[in-house]
Amino acid sequence: MLEPSTVLAFISVAIALIVSPGPDSIYTLTRSISDGRTAGVTAALGSSTGSIVHTAAAVLGLSAILQTSALAFTVVKFVGAAYLVYLGVQAFRSSEEFEITPDSTSYTPSESFRSALLINVLNPKVAVFFLAFLPQFVQPGSSSALQIFSLGVLFASLGFVYQAILAVFSARARRVITEREFVKTVLRVASGSVLVGFGVKLALERRTPS
């Protein structure tokens, strides 16, 4: 059983990591502003679900494959990088499908959930991070698998709360943004550039030797 002091220490470190800007939070922010609060919250849920997938993979030992196999790490890395670049290019597009308007949406909630889930799951660095980070807080004397899974769910829950708050507040600025064409253009270019940038960064990541 996890001690309260251990849980508090974990929460402190987890929050510091969660609030750091990354592709997950950037995607949630983009969906909230372009498609509204519901799309943003479902994107946050997709990202958190991805964290639980990584936790389960760590418990089952699947993440260890990414840590030890250069081929597996490289394949997942480039698939994830390509997907981020694809989303960034989509954001650059100026067709009506991707125009930010007060009442229309370019992504349904289910599409936002799926995209956020894939962004998270297809990042091998996240898988290796969970494999290395969660066991640091495991205490001897009880099931390590149960402790790791519990910590992973807690991490995912904290991440969801943060991103959901981000989604709600950013969605409130949606109507103001849609009234200014220049701001819409800047947002589209900025979000596209950031997503492509994260994709390139992921593609250039090197596997940490085991």
Image (cartoon, helix red, strand yellow):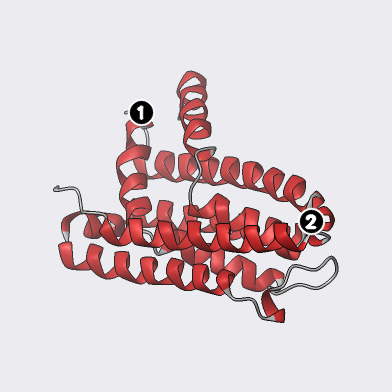
Q: Position of residue 198 (x, y in %)?
A: 42, 57
Which residue occupies 64% across, 53% down?
Answer: 29
Q: Please say whether residue 48 is visible from this viewpoint.
A: no
Is there a contact, CB below 8 Å, between mark 2 and mark 1? no
Badge 1 amino acid: Gln
Picture coordinates of residue 185, whole percent (x, y): 66, 63
Going by the image, does 19 lie left or right of 62?
A: right
Residue 114 is at least partly visible in this image: yes
**Three-letter residue code for mark 2:** Arg
Which class describes the residues within 10 Å of circle 2: few (<14), some (14-19), or many (20+)? many
Q: Quadrant of residue 157?
A: top right
Category of crowding for the residue at label 1, using alpha-carbon neighbours closer than 10 angstroms: few (below 14), some (14–19), many (at least 20) = some
Whichever of labels 2 and 1 marks the residue nearer the N terminus, that label is 1
User: 12 or 22, which is in the foreground?
Assistant: 22
Q: Which residue is mark 1?
A: 139
Q: Which residue is mark 2?
A: 174
Rendering coords of residue 168 (x, y %): 76, 48
Is residue 83 depicted above or below 165 in this figure? below
